[in-house]
Image (spheres, rainbow, N blue to C red):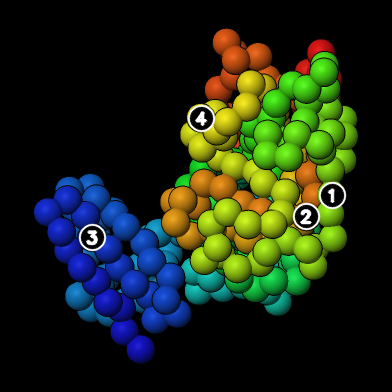
Amino acid sequence: MSLKYIQTKNNLVVTFPDGKNITLANKTKDGRQALKFVKTNDIEGLENLVYPLAGVTEWTKGQIKVDKGRVKIGEDRIPLFLAKKILEFKKSKLPYKPLLKFWSNLKSNPSKASKENLYEFLEKNNYPITDNGNFIAYKKVTLVDGVLKDSYTKTIDNSVGKVVKMKRSDVDDNPEQTCSNGLHAAAWDYAKDYSGNALVELLINPKNVVAVPRDYNAQKMRVCEYKVIRELDQSEAKERTELFVSEKSLFSKRK
């Protein structure tokens, strides 16, 4: 088993034996050190460089463990994006229990493909995790006779506080299908330009993600349930940059 890599003008892209990829800038200290590890096939050294998780076990009182650079919750090895979240939470001195709840929710998702695609969605779009292990997404809706409705059928009530759901079996789980059956949610950059005249913020449990279409740069998804948190004023709406959001604070922002 060996490391594979491609070195471009600006970056070093490394593939680990298990298939996970990392990208580092060539001219950085970490990039230069990573190249040394790659050339000597020092997998453990590279993992410890990329995932500097010293102190995580102590910080989480043993609930998150690091074994040879591999991060585990219980006996489960967790995905790269969640390992990064752990590092960010620790560095920012945020509570770690939401990460455990997120992982528990994610494990409850019955679709392996959905979970794997969701990793990319959350990592690319920097979504905050909430204290109950959920995450935030967005949706463009349409005001119909004073009520927020979905922009496609204009029949589904998306008023603030509403829990919108449908049978999971009725949602198309094929990520190769771009526009298909299901409740739609998206990243900020995608949602803000979609058809409709109002933008709402959604609270989604990762277990309810059914598909993340591959041809939209992981910016939209189909789910079987979400909760509408609030309607965003177009003048103040912007992409969230927080790592962590309290659900209590989210609902206190209702108008």
Give the residue at the far left of this rendering.
Answer: 9
Residue corresponding to mark 2: 224
| Discs 2, 1 touching: Cβ within 8 Å | yes
Residue corresponding to mark 4: 193
Give the class, few, some or many, for how many residues have Cα within 10 Å of label 3's Cα (few <14, many ≥20): many
Question: Label 4's element?
Answer: loop
Residue at image position (44%, 56%) is 215
Q: CA distance from mark 4 to mark 2?
A: 23 Å
Horizontal and vertical percent position of residue 243: 61, 37
Question: Label 2's element?
Answer: loop
Of marks 2 and 1, which one's residue comes earlier in the chain?
1
Residue at image position (65%, 73%) is 112
Give the class, few, some or many, for how many residues have Cα within 10 Å of label 1's Cα (few <14, many ≥20): some
Of marks 3 and 4, which one's residue comes earlier in the chain?
3
Residue at image position (58%, 54%) is 179
Q: CA distance from mark 3 to mark 2?
A: 39 Å
Residue corresponding to mark 3: 12
Residue at image position (55%, 63%) is 177
The quarter of the picture where the N terminus appears is bottom left
